[in-house]
Image (cartoon, coloured by chain):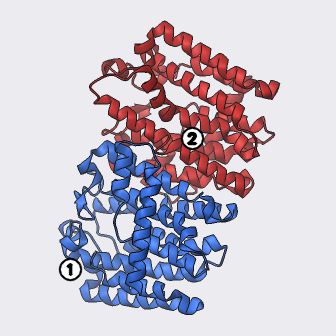
Chain colours: A blue, B red
């Protein structure tokens, strides 16, 4: 049920994303944007669409919000892969944008994907102007200097720090770098419905942390071919991670506890939230 | 009158920008954002505030829109100055962000300034949700892959093109690279008032083109100390510009015609638009 629904959402998102970018003027910039925004797990789109579904909002109505969070995520990967940042050559099994084009195109394609994300949040299909403005504000808070980019800056600073980060510092870093956008995605449905965001926020906070712990475990135990990116980077860089601080068994046990916490937070929605519960379990079982 | 009003707006924008960025979490990221967003002519903020004024909207009410366009402009300069783009060491008389910090900080500070720009457009002080959503959408269209970033990508492509650009191609490039955001700024007041954007769009289109022609003239005739940036770059790079295509006298005459056109477009607003008319004249008389 979960995997079928995820596949259905992945397919719909690919089509809608290609259409949203296909409307832009032709050229390298558009090609690089389309390339960067294709593929991926579409976990964030799934969260946006399923959190909308439990509020009675259709996939078609929630789609621009799902595309927005995926475009925002894609921009962050394009910039994060650049030589001056993480310097990665491979992403989703393909050459990264700066390898396939060049650094300037990577800067611009990332910039324009961020812009596109905010433009998508203004799509009238999403509903009232009040809810669309709330969506823009929430996306900005999740992704800017208080959210994702803040986490990225802490991550960059940690690389040159004399002392490895503590567990609390890593939790704060990851709450920004990956947690804030996952949390936005899971709240998107409640925002579009003008409903209470509390339960979904609690769900997403636990989910986001579990996601990052699973990423750290994947970096140690994962298969590069399945993951579509270089692994083992953290150990190579002697970087403090959830695995280095908690041990492999400790990290797995913590992630499992967080998944149980995420599932429990969905109690108010009953059966309607079953795919979101399954998604929490998927987050720590995935191989990419 | 114009220069006093510009100074008044410059001072108010500096204070408000420092406050908007000062609310973010402390660190290099915030410092680099504040550094990049300080100073400058504040021409775009002036256009936003004065276009609001002719619709009876106060400076305090229009300020978040003025800050948004300045934050957006600042982000574009930070990224444009990077080594993989224009590779400039000096901006507004100070070392550029990647020189003062590093490339990673320049990428992230630019990214977060773009995010801040969209967040500012959601400020409730700006008015109804309808008008704020319209502002977000207009800023996205002006600054993304159909507007500013599109122009920047054309500019990058032109640098490696075998044949210099034609006049029509340069007009299209500049309409994106500098024109779209100037046009957004001049329309901001009409958007906030929910009023007809026609006259201000006509004004801004002529103004934006005059601005760019003046920039090309400054690059040839200007004083580096007054300009606060490196000049003579276009000739050095054998780049086609309005000056190389029209000659210095031809460029000056075209700019003057455009200023007259911009002033004429403001006729519907009568005396209320006198500072916007003066601004059009300033655009071709400035030394930075």
Same chain, marks 2 and 1?
no
Establish if A190 lies above or below B121: below
Which x, y percent locates residue B60?
A: 74, 45
Q: Residues within 10 Å of mark 2 (few under 14, many from 20)?
A: many
Establish if A255 lies above or below A96: below
Identified at 61% across, 71% down, the residue is A191
Mark yes or no: residue B36 visible: no
Q: Which mark is residue B280?
A: none
Identified at 51% across, 43% down, the residue is B143
Q: Which residue is mark 2?
A: B70
- Name the side, left or right, on which A7 lies relative to B182: left
Report the front residue among A275 and A284: A275
**Callout count:** 2
- Name the side, left or right, on which A260 lies relative to B64: left
Which x, y percent locates residue B56?
A: 81, 40
Q: Secondary structure at mark 1?
A: helix
Q: Which mark is residue A221?
A: 1
Q: Secondary structure at mark 2?
A: helix
Q: Residue furthest top?
A: B249
């Amino acid at each position: 049920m979960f995997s079928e629904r995820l596949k259905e959402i992945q397919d719909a998102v690919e089509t809608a994303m290609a259409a949203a970018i296909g409307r832009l003027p032709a050229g390298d910039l558009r090609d690089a944007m389309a390339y960067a925004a294709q593929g991926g797990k579409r976990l964030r789109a799934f969260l946006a669409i399923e959190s909308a579904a439990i509020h009675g909002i259709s996939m078609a109505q929630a789609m621009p919000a799902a595309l927005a969070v995926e475009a925002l995520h894609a921009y962050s990967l394009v910039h994060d892969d650049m030589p001056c940042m993480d310097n990665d050559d491979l992403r989703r099994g393909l050459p990264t944008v700066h390898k396939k084009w060049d650094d300037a195109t990577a800067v611009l394609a990332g910039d324009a994907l961020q812009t596109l994300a905010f433009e998508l949040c203004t799509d009238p299909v999403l509903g009232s102007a009040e809810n669309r403005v709330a969506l823009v504000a929430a996306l900005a808070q999740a992704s800017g200097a208080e959210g994702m980019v803040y986490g990225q800056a802490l991550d960059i600073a940690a690389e040159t720090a004399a002392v490895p980060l503590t567990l609390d510092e890593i939790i704060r870093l990851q709450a920004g770098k990956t947690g804030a956008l996952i949390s936005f995605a899971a709240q998107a449905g409640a925002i579009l419905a003008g409903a209470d965001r509390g339960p979904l926020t609690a769900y997403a906070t636990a989910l986001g942390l579990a996601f990052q712990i699973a990423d750290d475990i994947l970096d140690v135990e994962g298969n590069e071919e399945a993951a579509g990116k270089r692994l083992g980077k953290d150990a190579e860089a002697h970087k403090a991670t959830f695995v280095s601080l908690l041990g492999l068994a400790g990290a797995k046990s913590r992630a499992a506890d967080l998944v149980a916490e995420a599932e429990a937070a969905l109690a108010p929605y009953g059966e309607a939230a079953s795919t979101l519960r399954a998604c929490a379990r998927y987050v720590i079982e995935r191989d990419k």
